[in-house]
Amino acid sequence: MRSLRIGLLLGLRQIQRAGKFTTLLIIFVMMLTFLNLIAVSGVLIGLIAGAEQAVRQNGLGDLVISPKDAEDHILDTEAVIRYLEAYPEIATYSVRYAGNAVLEANYKERRNLQNERDETAVTVTGIDPYREDTMSDLSQWIVEGEYLDPNEEGYILIGAYYVSQYAELYGDIFETIEEVHPGDTVRMTLGDVSKEFTVKGIIQSKVDDVNLNTYINEKEFRRLFNRIDRNADLIVMKLHHPEQNAQVKESMVQSGLSSYAKIQTFEEGLPKFLTDIKNTFDLLGTFIGSIGIIVASITIFIIIFINALSRRRHIGILKGIGIERRAIEIAYVLQAAFYALAGSLLGALLTYLVLVPHFAANPINFPFSDGILVAPPESTFIKFMILFVITLIAGFLPAWMIARQNTLNSILGRK
Amino acid sequence: MKPIITAKDIHRSFGKGHLETHVLKGIDLEVSEGEFLAIMGKSGAGKSTLMYQLSLLDKPTSGSILIDDKNVLSLSEREKTRFRLNTLGYIFQDYALVPDLSAIENVMVPILMRGGSWERAKRTAKESLDSVGLEGKYENLPSELSGGEQQRVAVARAIAGKPKIIFADEPTANLDSVSGERVIDLIASLNKAGQTIVMVTHESEYAQSCHRIIHMEDGAIVKEEKRK
């Protein structure tokens, strides 16, 4: 207790009397370390969180109904829809039919039949354009042309990755049809059946499933793909209270809906690769942050070491007049604690008052997501505690090294 | 008078083998309670080294030291630190104040370490500073004080805990003659009040107030002068 009191007095006065520039510089370094720890991993995770958000907002919604594992489609889809219509928690939903076909373009200009066809295999989704738009805001992702009209047939929306002028930005990853624009005619073929469509619009979103998709009116889809039973492939929905999706799912299961289909929350329905990438990015961010912590702890070590070394004689004198070593060590640990606390506090203020709101308002524009800064307070607190403890150790070690030296040697400046 | 320090056959050497240097060569010395002893000698005579042994800042290679009837060489480092805190006071050549602490805080630190309350430490520190003529300079940092004033703060720090013995290592070495005399007068007045003092000096005029002067040469006491 006595040592603590003396240590606090010595440490406090050292902080007070230290050069302001040096103090500010050290606090600045600690702030950068904090930001490195929180913001770097936050942005990395934010990329995936942004992608997740986009998938939830513009793809899967809060709850997903899909075929049971042994089935190809959702059984008795109409009964399921009737149930959903009556369910008060559901804000909106969309029924999707999915199939695969070959899409051919520019066939009218193909004079030489020996030439290769301009075609690509595509995923086709049959939707009710109105419902789908209320569910996933699909119309807002039209980059060329217009959105589908619920009352029109013979029109198609094509995902950007199937069209050369958009897909070429990503190299040769995607198989495309060449230079197709709204108003052009394309031909969809599945098996022996072919149908011509007029391109209504090109659609490009942060969700790859949208970019790698073509959309047609559901009635036309059912005819083309011979889905007379009206059983759908996917029903996605948004809830009035998205955070209660697990409870709503449970209630649907309880009411027997799971005998027709598999019901999953968004989190359960999320592609595993997204979760894997998120975990990997988190690990990567922690790794980068750890390097930051090591650099900061070495910085603190050097600062405290130089500080203690330059005061070695005074440390010797303090010991000489009977001040316990522990008090001297506490004084230096207090300084390290002050630097860590001040730097982290500034870093936290900058993170939560500036960076998080800034990235929320101006997400980083990545091809697959709108990157935000994810910095959950609990995780920030844990990282801060790690930084704090390591800084304390980095402050203690040099003080301990200098304070344990022979008292008389310290007083006389001998080695 | 009862001896407060009894040192017998004190040897101190540095280095090993053919590089070994014998700085103290079997010193026998007694210091009585209330005595003012001066240790004099040329540079390298071993006077400071002797004082470091007696004041527990160093450990002799061999020999024994009793302070206040306690075999101090058998104490652990921690016990020695506590012993120095409670029994001994120090005045160093270059004041040895903590530069970040004000004059009063420099004096308060050992009092607080002894367990005194903040208020008591402050009161005692003020009394000590007043007694060395530093009223009104309580809050000054060492850098804001002259050399003489700094040394008086060091004296105030040494006496604040009412130690049994004060060790002064060339306390006037860095002072001008006026400040030096003032510090010596201060130390002498402490002795008159019954304080035991062991002072190392190489300036004979400052040793005039002492009861006894021992002269050292080449690690041994070569002459002893009783003055009063």
Image (tube, rainbow, N blue to C red):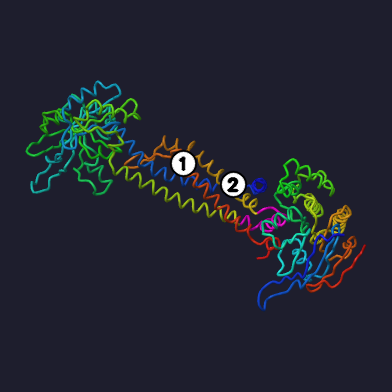
Q: Is residue A37 above or below residue A73?
A: below
Q: Quarter of the image for the C terminus of chain A: give it.
A: bottom right
Q: Is residue B64 above or below residue A61?
A: below
Q: Quadrant location of residue A78? A: top left
- Between discs 2 and 1, the one toward the N terminus: 2
Specify the farthest residue to the right: B228
Which residues make up the magenta segment? A306-324
Residue A13 in view (yes/no): no
Task: Point out residue A25 in the picture as x, y percentages from the top left corner.
Answer: 57, 49
Q: In this view, does A229 lie above or below B135?
A: above
Marks 2 and 1 belong to one chain: yes
A131 left or right of B203 in image:
left
- According to the picture, the residue beneath numbered tag 2 turns out to be A24
- Tell me which amino acid carries mark 2: Leu
- According to the picture, the residue beneath numbered tag 1 turns out to be A380
Tell me the SS state at disc 2.
helix
Q: Does the magenta stretch include residue A310?
A: yes
Q: Quadrant location of residue A363? A: top left
B194 left or right of A310 in image:
right
**Closer to viewer: mark 2 or mark 1:** 1
Q: Quarter of the image for the N terminus of chain A: give it.
A: top right
Subunit ID for the residue under disc 2: A
